[in-house]
Image: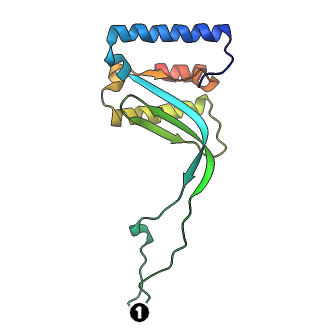
């Protein structure tokens, strides 16, 4: 999503990033594209239900007790949640649902990076050693000094 009114400095910055990506693609080809991990964080409506499995809903009963228990009807509920999603060219790497009322700041984002690292190790072996190219916007939690240091380490 691109803001409607970009200042000249933003246009120049985006053009520079696009040219750098194009240059890296010409140098490394598909290998470069396969190293890109994209992130998007947004508040969105999520429908959910806490459904029980058959095993969870089983209950012990006496031989004379009725065989069929009545269960309340489960309905979907929807609420707004903050969701952060990381993906690459092959797979969704991590979906992080934030607890209600949580604000995404550099501390929360750094904790999410630790989870992302484990997700990459599990789902895309070798990607960390070849070098991840993280593609995200320039929101303050993403550009804070603490976040940049966590990314570099």
Foreground of the two, 148 or 74:
74
Q: Quadrant of the N terminus?
A: top right
Residue 53 in the image, given as x and y percentages of width and height: 42, 65
- The picture quadrant where one finds residue 77 is bottom right
Total numbered labels placed on residues in the image = 1
Identify the secondary structure beneath mark 1: loop
Horizontal side of residue 33 vs 111, given as left or right: left
Single out the residue that lies furthest toward the bottom.
64
Residue 89 in the image, given as x and y percentages of width and height: 38, 28
Residue 133 vertical position relative to residue 60 in the rendered view, above or below: above
Single out the residue that lies furthest toward the front.
4
Residue 22 in the image, given as x and y percentages of width and height: 42, 10
Q: Residue at x 41, y 88 (%)?
A: 62
Single out the residue that lies furthest toward the left.
126
Q: Residue at x 37, y 12 (%)?
A: 25
Residue 45 vertical position relative to residue 33 in the rendered view, above or below: below
Residue 115 in the image, given as x and y percentages of width and height: 46, 36
Mark 1 Cα-neighbour bin, 10 Å: few <14, some 14–19, many ≥20? few
Q: Quadrant of the C terminus?
A: top left
Foreground of the two, 94 or 25:
25
Residue under circle 1? Answer: 64
Foreground of the two, 111 or 131:
131
Horizontal side of residue 30 vs 136, given as left or right: left
Q: Residue at x 30, y 26 (%)?
A: 126
* Coloring applied to the structure: rainbow
């Amino acid at each position: 999503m691109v803001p409607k009114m970009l200042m000249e400095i933003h246009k120049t910055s985006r053009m520079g990033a696009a040219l750098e990506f194009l240059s890296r693609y010409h140098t490394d080809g598909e290998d470069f594209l396969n190293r890109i991990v994209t992130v998007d964080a947004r508040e969105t409506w999520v429908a959910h239900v806490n459904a029980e499995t058959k095993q969870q809903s089983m209950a012990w009963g006496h031989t004379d007790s009725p065989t069929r228990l009545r269960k309340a009807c489960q309905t979907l509920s929807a609420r707004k949640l903050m969701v952060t999603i990381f993906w690459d060219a092959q797979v969704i790497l991590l979906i992080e649902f934030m607890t209600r009322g949580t604000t995404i700041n550099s501390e929360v984002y750094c904790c999410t990076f630790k989870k992302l690292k484990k997700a990459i190790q599990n789902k895309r072996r070798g990607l960390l050693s070849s070098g991840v190219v993280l593609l995200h916007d320039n929101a303050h939690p993403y550009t804070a000094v603490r976040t940049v240091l966590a990314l570099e380490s």
